[in-house]
RNA sequence: GGUCUGGUGGCCGAGUGGCUAGGCUCAGCUCUGCAAAAGCUGCUACAGCGGUUCGAAUCCGCUCCAGACCUCCA
């Protein structure tokens, strides 16, 4: 593989079977990149005016796995995930005010101070859940010039008009020659009936029109000069601008949460097409579904979202206890991204136990010795078959729940071999190791969590001493001492597991 | 009101014309000094009513229920 000159040859043969559920066509389609081996992917990132909640995490986790898998297949992926640091309206009655500007005033901070704080928080959370950083993480405020440029293109093409220092996209005009609403299945005449009292409604030629540029009044904190006066960019524009800038006018994958489908993504398409004319700027749209709590969407306005800190400590009225980040990651991966996932204590606890069994088998693999074929010993199943099933699962629209099921089949093999009940060659052991490393580690992004926080060698040594003492007590049939060691360790959260050839231990 | 998802065993969740994932729980067994861990076995479901079919949980129609979007939200 030549890093300077990547070619198709670098891409795995398994890549040809990858199918993606395209929300534009509402069908599963075979994934064929525009310019293999390069793949361009854009994902709508967070608005950094408050802490991220778990619903956000789920979406970014979905695309983390997509990213990881494409990279694993050998594609050269440019993954762009923006930071929205300006531009969204508040949900309150003070219409038209910039969310971040408002927050800044409330807390008496500079807008960019707010942005920085929550951007840092966002990055910390991503790290905690082992979500990889994107290739480029552009900000809206860093692309004001480009946004103004795109507005000018749209105006020049006749799809936008200026009114009183603001610029609006002319949806009706656009719909005369283009298919507005194709992504979300909306028809313009039905939308027409939904009139709302939004700020600037009187400036619009039609209630369907949306803002590309908004005039800023004197009290507005985030403001930039433009050909139309002092103002700030519209809600949907940044994504059109930044995807075009970094991925081109047509690119492979665009992702985001289901709730962005309309109007955000619909507007994005209209802006791209209105500016550049390409019919389908995005070839594959992927929408992640919502996380619910007791059947209700987790959202900022409902107040039923957990922060990662509350989740880990269990310090929230809806949580019975804390759950580790890996437990949460695993829990989310046990459901398919396109379906809703309901967050509940029993479900989380089931995931916690399941993950523990999976990770403990994976751990066992490090020192697993091959077992010879012999009478009365079962022989191992076809390990290439396991690997093929794992690829098939991921190739079927990133079906992580099925992949996890395959991994559990591997868990059974590992445990059986470890117990001396199943035969496995050295190559077989190696093949299992690679299965776990590739699919469990590289693709699902699971990693061993230890609650030690320190000197692993020393811990191993101390535990070794205790296990030896207990073994000696057991040899002397001194059950009281043996049980004392086991129980005292259990109180500290260390679990003793007696096996055929020795004792192992794990932290809770 | 419009658009769109979905209703699967005790719980969570895949699948989607025949062979009926997986995890957790529960019960029994093996192993064990006892336990834990591990393995084996059992619990066998697809909201309701019609229809298509040799055959449907899977396709079609209707009904009921839930959720999302239509205003910022991942």
Image: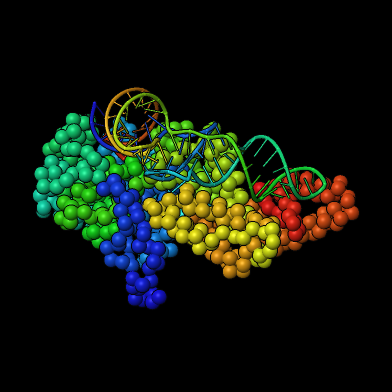
Q: Quadrant of residue A426?
A: bottom right
Left or right: A256 in relation to A205: right
Depth check, front residue: A39 or B17: B17
Q: Quadrant of residue B41?
A: top right
Residue at the image point whose x is 64% and y is 55% from the top: A415
User: How is the structure coloured here?
Assistant: rainbow
Residue at the image point whose x is 59% and y is 52% from the top: A358
Residue A351 visible (yes or no) = yes
Depth check, front residue: A453 or A27: A27
Q: Is residue A114 above or below residue A302?
A: below
Left or right: A136 in relation to A477: left
Give the total of numbered labels.
0
**Where does residue A109 sit, x and y in percent of width and height?**
40, 45
**Where does residue A5 sit, x and y in percent of width and height?**
34, 76
Left or right: B39 in relation to A227: right
Depth check, front residue: B62 or A356: B62
Depth check, front residue: A188 or A10: A10
Q: Is residue A430 above or below residue A145?
A: below
**Where does residue A212 sit, x and y in percent of width and height?**
21, 47
Q: Is residue B40 above or below residue A18?
A: above
Quadrant showing the N terminus of chain A: bottom left
**Where does residue A188 sit, x and y in percent of width and height?**
17, 37
Residue at the image point whose x is 75% and y is 53% from the top: A498
Residue A63 visible (yes or no) = no
Residue at the image point whose x is 16% and y is 49% from the top: A228
């Amino acid at each position: 593989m030549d890093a300077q000159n990547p070619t198709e040859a670098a891409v795995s043969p398994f890549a040809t079977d990858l199918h993606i559920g395209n929300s534009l066509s509402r069908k599963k389609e075979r994934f064929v990149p525009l310019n293999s081996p390069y793949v361009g992917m854009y994902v709508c990132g967070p608005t950094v005016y408050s802490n991220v909640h778990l619903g956000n995490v789920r979406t970014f986790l979905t695309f983390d796995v997509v990213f990881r898998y494409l990279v694993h297949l050998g594609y050269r992926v440019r993954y762009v995930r923006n930071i929205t640091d300006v531009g969204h309206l508040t949900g309150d009655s003070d219409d038209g005010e910039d969310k971040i500007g408002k927050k800044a005033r409330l807390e008496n901070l500079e807008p960019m101070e707010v942005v920085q704080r929550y951007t840092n928080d966002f990055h910390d959370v991503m790290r905690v859940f082992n979500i990889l950083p994107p290739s480029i993480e552009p900000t809206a405020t860093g692309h004001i010039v480009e946004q103004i440029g795109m507005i000018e293109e749209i105006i020049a093409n006749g799809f936008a008009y200026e009114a009183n220092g603001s610029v609006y996209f002319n949806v009706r005009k656009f719909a005369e020659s283009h298919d507005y609403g194709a992504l979300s299945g909306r028809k313009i005449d039905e939308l027409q009936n939904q009139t709302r009292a939004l700020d600037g409604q009187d400036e619009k030629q039609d209630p369907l029109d949306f803002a590309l540029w908004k005039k800023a009044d004197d009290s507005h904190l985030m403001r930039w000069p433009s050909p139309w006066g002092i103002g700030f960019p519209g809600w949907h524009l940044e994504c059109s601008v930044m995807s075009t800038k970094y991925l081109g006018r047509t690119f492979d994958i665009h992702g985001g949460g289901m709730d962005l489908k309309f109007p955000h993504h619909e507007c994005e398409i209209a802006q791209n097409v209105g500016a550049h004319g390409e019919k389908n700027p995005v070839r594959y749209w992927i929408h992640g579904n919502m996380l619910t709590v007791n059947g209700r969407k987790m959202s900022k306005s409902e107040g039923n979202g957990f922060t990662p800190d509350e989740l880990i400590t269990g310090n929230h009225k809806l949580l019975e206890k804390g759950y580790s980040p890996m437990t949460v990651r695993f829990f989310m991966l046990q459901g398919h991204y396109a379906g809703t996932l309901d967050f509940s204590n029993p479900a989380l606890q089931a995931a916690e136990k399941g993950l523990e069994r999976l990770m403990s088998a994976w751990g066992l693999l490090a020192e697993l010795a091959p077992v010879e074929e012999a009478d009365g010993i079962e022989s191992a199943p076809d390990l290439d078959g396991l690997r093929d099933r794992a690829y098939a699962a991921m190739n079927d629209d990133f079906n992580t729940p099925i992949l996890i099921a395959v991994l559990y089949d591997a868990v059974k093999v590992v445990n059986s071999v470890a117990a001396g009940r199943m035969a496995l060659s050295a190559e077989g052991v190696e093949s299992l190791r690679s299965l776990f490393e590739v699919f469990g580690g590289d693709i699902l992004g699971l990693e061993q969590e230890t609650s030690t926080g320190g000197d692993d060698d020393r811990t191993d040594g101390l535990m070794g001493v205790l296990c030896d003492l207990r073994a000696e007590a057991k040899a002397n049939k001194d059950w009281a001492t043996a049980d004392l060691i086991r129980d005292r360790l259990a109180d500290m959260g260390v679990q003793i597991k007696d096996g055929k050839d020795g004792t192992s231990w794990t932290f809770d």
